[in-house]
Amino acid sequence: MHNDHNSAPRTFDGNPPEKLLTLQQAADLLGIPIWKVRRAAKSGVFATYHVANSRALVNLSEVVATIEASKVGGDNDVTF
């Protein structure tokens, strides 16, 4: 019998969860100003997560998806 008690956490689709990044880390990785990431996060353009009362964290893929949507005329009010 296979025991999965010690396996890494998985999402519903079976993939490992994406690492959450601070807004500054996301801005640095994407080469965009931090104020643009903060403004988008504050306006709710993409989800932010707070673990144990920590600062705002984001999934990089969600930030990238927001940027891509804004390039193709998406409904977002934020311009990157």
Image (tube, rainbow, N blue to C red):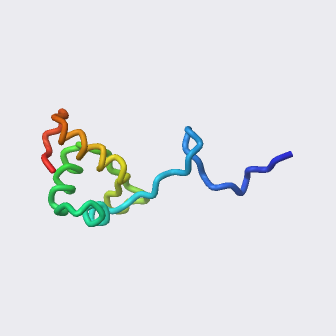
Residue at the limit of the structure toward the right, as seen here: 1
Residue at the limit of the structure toward the front, as seen here: 72
Q: Position of residue 49 (x, y in %)?
A: 37, 52
Residue at (23%, 39%) from the top-left corner? 69
Quarter of the rendering containing residue 76: top left
Quadrant of the snapshot with the N terminus: top right
**Of the pair 59 and 29, the residue shown nearer to us:** 29
Q: Position of residue 79 (x, y in %)?
A: 13, 47
Residue at (30%, 60%) from the top-left corner? 26
**Of the pair 63 and 73, the residue shown nearer to us:** 73
Q: Is residue 73 above or below residue 26?
A: above
Q: Is residue 15 above or below residue 19?
A: above
Q: Position of residue 77 (x, y in %)?
A: 13, 40
Q: Position of residue 80 (x, y in %)?
A: 15, 51
Residue at (19%, 49%) from the top-left corner? 40
**Of the pair 56 and 62, the residue shown nearer to us:** 62
Counting every numbered tag in the picture gives: 0
Residue at (26%, 66%) from the top-left corner? 28
Q: Is residue 61 above or below residue 19?
A: above
Q: Is residue 55 above or below residue 11?
A: below
| 78 on left or right of 27 | left
